[in-house]
Image (spheres, rainbow, N blue to C red):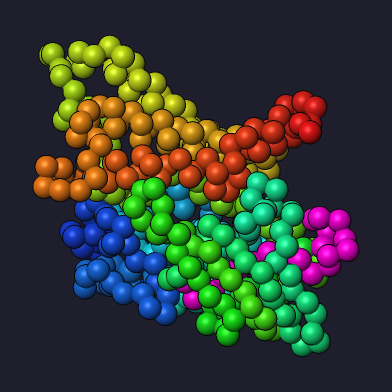
Amino acid sequence: MDDLEQFRIEVREWLEANCPASQRQPITPEEQYWGGRNGSFASEDARVWFERMLARGWTVPEWPREYGGAGLDAQQARILKKEMNRLGCRTPLYGLGIWMLGPALLEHGNEEQKRVHLRAIAEGRLRWCQGYSEPGAGSDLASLQTRAEDHGDHFLVNGSKIWTSQADKSDWIFCLVRTDPQARKQQGISFLLIDMATPGVSVSPIELISGSSEFCQTFFDNVRVPKENLVGELNAGWSVAKALLKHERKLMSELGTESATAEYAPIECARRYLPQENGRITDAVMRDALARHEMQMHAIGLTQLRILEESRAGTGDGFAALVMKYCGTEEEKRKKELMVAMMGSQGIGWEGEDFNAAEIDTARQCLFSKALSIAGGTTEVQLNIIAKRALDLPGVT
């Protein structure tokens, strides 16, 4: 038995012994634990499960132990994830700090920033949001105009960010700001960490078509930010931003692989709502669409495994990872549309006792999925990047 198989056995045994039964059920958004100053657990079992995972460093399993992680390599982390999925274990802690800021700090932060912020993220003490897009700078992010003026021992920040996910619930924001308005677009941008409790920071939620208010607009009015909150070099924040976007796009390419939600999986949805004969879906169009989706998801999973192996061997060129954000988000949209189609009239329920929780969640998530081809880089921009970098085609002007 090799070391990885032994690790798998140990992980499986530990999860079976330590994950409460209630934490092996599909999770609703209301039950997710995001930590932070105002974070609360949905149940005592959720608290116990979080604390047990935290004690092993498994809220951030690939981070170094000195920053609250377990120091697992990529293969071990993949095994842990697969074993959690096999048992149905809920993700114990969610957060942009885990998925995006933490990896960027590990690469670009100084030792003091790592010491102060990484363990707070791993332990769920602080909740982060992302300050990138602005009303006049979306896909063309480098056109951002939020300014940070040098005032000796601090920056003075003025401007606004939009589509700031869960800013109204977050403690800190990692933010791109313009520190040299005379420089070329990307060359005058810096990366700042800002405490949302600082005077001058205000947040206004934006209601979405899905009925939720996950996104916000965040305003900065003469906000004082200490110089030690600058990540990387002054005016070199674009490099940090690109590193962070790499992790964001990886996260989005893996949608649907985390803890199960209240909605049905596509195959379960087909069994519940589509006519069948001898175990075979009678609607040929739906049968073909479902088969295509399952094959696509299998191909995406294999490609993720290939990216992992190439990274481990040091042979990857990064092109496959570029493609995965596009493939993952587009397939997620197709999946939601397929499930609504399979449900028929039950797939357009918004509220009321005529629809169960999974049907309502599917309708709302179908609408929300449209945002996935915008967040982290629009599909159109992503395709241009793929064409230029991976396929060496002429740039689009």
Q: Residue at x 21, y 17 (%)?
A: 281
**Residue 325: percent from the left, percent from the top?**
55, 40
Please identify the quarter of the rendering in which residue 268 is found.
top left
Q: Looking at the image, which residue sits at the far right? A: 182
**Residue 220: percent from the left, percent from the top?**
62, 74
Disc tally is: 0
Taking the image as shown, residue 201 lies to the left or right of residue 30, namely right
Q: Residue at x 29, y 19 (%)?
A: 286
Residue 188 in view, yes or no: yes
Taking the image as shown, residue 266 lies to the left or right of residue 176, namely left
Which residues fall within the magenta stretch?
170-188
Q: Quadrant of the C terminus?
A: top right
Q: Residue at x 29, y 27 (%)?
A: 341
Q: Quadrant of the N terminus?
A: top left
Question: Which of the pair 203/37 is nearer the observer?
Answer: 203
**Residue 293: percent from the left, percent from the top?**
38, 26
Judge whether 202 appears above or below 252 on screen.
below
Residue 233 in view, yes or no: no
Q: Residue at x 23, y 14 (%)?
A: 283
Q: Looking at the image, which residue sits at the far bottom? A: 153
Please identify the quarter of the rendering in which residue 92 is found.
bottom left
Queried whether the magenta region covers residue 173, the answer comes back as: yes
Judge whether 9 appears above or below 168 on screen.
above
Please identify the quarter of the rendering in which residue 28 is found.
bottom left
Taking the image as shown, residue 373 lies to the left or right of residue 239, namely left
Question: Which of the pair 148/236 is nearer the observer?
Answer: 148
Queried whether the magenta region covers residue 159, the answer comes back as: no
Question: Which of the pair 249/86 is nearer the observer?
Answer: 249
**Residue 393: percent from the left, percent from the top?**
77, 26
